[in-house]
Image (spheres, rainbow, N blue to C red):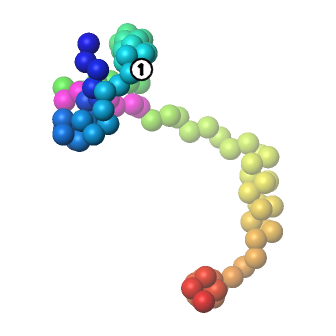
Amino acid sequence: MRTTPVRFLGDQEAAAYGPLPRVGVAALDEALRYVGGRLAANADVRVDVAGKIHVASDKAIAEPPSLIDLRRRVAAMLPRIDIGDQILEVMG
């Protein structure tokens, strides 16, 4: 089992992080095996030939009326300002 981190930056950059504790390696290995075992059953996740993971986008849910009302009330509370005045206020 490898005890040093493997990063896409290369071995030289990875060496700067030093060795991983054995406990961390075992926990990471267990988690990766658990996730890897479940990938085949999930149609929304796929791994391409280059090893990149692709996840399907979530379906949008409708905004509840309470959110629409909250957005309207918050917008009504905000002051109307000129963007030029705001820039001068921040920069000045």
Would residue 14 appear left or right of 27 to someone viewing this image? left
Quick check: 2 above or below 7? above
Amino acid type at image mark 1? Gly
- Side of 60 relative to 28 (left or right): right
Q: Residue placed at 18% from the left, 26% from the top?
A: 49
Q: What element does badge 1 sit on?
A: helix
Q: Give the residue at mark 1.
A: 24
Say which quarter of the image contains residue 12. Answer: top left
Q: Where is residue 6 in the image (x, y as percent from the top left)?
A: 25, 30
Classify residue 52 by image quadrant.
Answer: top left
- What residue do we see at 53% from left, 34% from top? 59
In the figure, 17 relative to 44: above or below? below
Q: Quadrant of the N terminus?
A: top left
Quadrant occupied by the C terminus: bottom right
Q: Would residue 8 be visible to someone looking at this image?
A: no
Number of numbered callouts drawn: 1
Give x and y (percent) for residue 90: 61, 82
Residue at 30% from the left image edge and 32% from the top image edge: 18
Q: Who is closer to the viewer here, 41 or 12?
A: 12
Magenta-drawn segment: 50-56
Mark 1 nearby-residue class (10 Å; few <14, some 14–19, many ≥20): few
Q: In this view, does 2 lie above or below 52?
A: above
Residue 44 drawn in magenta: no
Visible residue check, residue 89:
yes
Looking at the picture, how far across and down is residue 11, in whole percent? 18, 35
Q: Which of 50 and 44 is in front in this view?
A: 50
